[in-house]
Amino acid sequence: MKTVNIGLIGGGFMGRTHSNAYRKVNAFFKLGYRPVLKTFCDVNESKAKTFAENWGYESHETDWRKLLARKDIDLIDICVPNMAHREIAIAAAEAGKMLICEKPLAINTAEAEQMVSAVEKAKVANMVMFNYRRVPAITLARQLVDEGRIGRPFHYRATYLQDWTISTDVPQGGDALWRLDAKVAGSGVTGDLLAHSIDTAEWLNGPIQRVTAATETFIKQRKHVESGKVEEVKIDDACMFLAIFANGSMGTFESTRYARGRKNFNTFELNGEAGSVYFDLEDPQYLQYFKYKDPKSGDKTEGHLTGWQKIHVTNAEHPYMDKWWVPGCTIGYEHTFINALADFFTGLETGKPAQPDFRCGLRTQKVCDAVLESARTGKWIDIA
Ligand code: SOE
């Protein structure tokens, strides 16, 4: 078994999800690689020390450049706010390190392109952590598409709704609320939430060709945690867009952090000639499937027994589930990161890199940028 020494940067929500996944992946998956939690890095010394001790890193570091210079680090995992992804990723690739980067890949297409060039030039393994692809029910949806159970696609409908920024008292900026600060996050719900929806949509239904969008910023000013002053809010609080996919189907995407009662309501529905699938992250164990035509026999389901099937995705024959518990026993959010790391290490072993890699993350970035451009100009934007 080969070891991969991990240097993880950034101890927020995502630093915790990734650290947890490194600790568990070998206990559940038989892999040829074993990650070793070598060093955790954060600019704040006491935070770095506490985080490293809590999650079992061998040591801590406060300067990411020193971390990159170390010969004993094989993989850099970037869990810092979006605006810092580019610089760290390029330097890490130049230092020959493998890379895992939290989504979205960058704050815009130009930065994402530079990151792709760097990893491709250095020929280092790389992956963007779009963890929802590894929800077994979503992976099953992809399997149904591949099996021809959806047939010719007509409609794709995605929502990603939350409600945590409704209060005017929520400030922007700083460690916890950088997602509300455009300088640091790049954008609002488009980069933070719709990036997930776009990644899933393109994975299930192929490339998006054109978009037209509208965004809104409901609360125009918020106190900034760092300056202490009330400053203009420059992120999109809500975004809706229409999409035309290369396969001719039509899509609608809606995202907001102002949907009272919705916490992480990430849903999609795909309607095709042969069938439909529906998924809701607030009910993540299930994939709903409407079968109209069997792809092999061509038999049609019609009549009084026609209806949606609610598939409890916990059987051993379901994606990833043979690695977890017994049928009927569910897995959850944290496991999507573990499944993703298992795919990454399997990719190292087989030489077939796990997706989405940085190049694939760049696609998502291009769609996000087209959405924001359309919202600014009021025009349909083609995606190259
Ligand atoms: C935002 O609230 C957020 O934490 C996103 O940044 C994550 O990517 C998403 O999965 C959950 O919500």
Image (tube, helix red, strand yellow):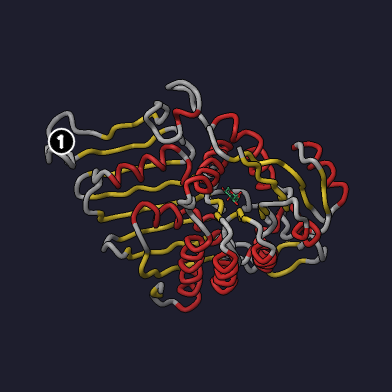
User: Which residue is nearer to you in this view: 241 or 325?
Assistant: 325
Q: Is residue 300 left or right of residue 215?
A: left
In percent of width and height, residue 52 lies at 79, 42
Circle 1 crowding by C-alpha within 10 Å: few under 14, some 14–19, many from 20: some
In percent of width and height, residue 171 lies at 73, 57
Where is 96 relative to 11, above or below?
below
Q: Picture quarter containing residue 138?
A: top left
User: Which residue is nearer to you in this view: 175 or 102?
Assistant: 102
Q: Picture quarter containing residue 24?
A: top right
Answer yes or no: is residue 288 visible. yes
Residue extending farthest to the front is 1
Where is 226 relative to 163, above or below?
below
Q: Is residue 369 left or right of residue 9?
A: left
Q: Quadrant of the C terminus?
A: bottom left
Q: Please give the name of the residue rendered at 37% of the width and 58% of the height, measured from the top-left corner.
A: 252
Q: Disc 1 designates what residue?
A: 301
Where is 187 relative to 276, above or below?
below
Q: Label 1 CB, ligand 1: below 8 Å? A: no
Residue extending farthest to the right is 46
Answer yes or no: is residue 181 visible. no
Q: Please give the name of the residue rendered at 64% of the width and 44% of the height, measured from the top-left corner.
A: 18
Q: Quadrant of the N terminus?
A: top right
In percent of width and height, residue 50 lies at 83, 41
In percent of width and height, residue 195 lies at 51, 58
Q: Is residue 272 left or right of residue 170?
A: left
Q: Please give the name of the residue rendered at 29% of the width and 47% of the height, measured from the top-left corner.
A: 146
User: Given the image, on which type of amino acid does mark 1 rest?
Assistant: Thr
Q: Secondary structure at mark 1?
A: loop
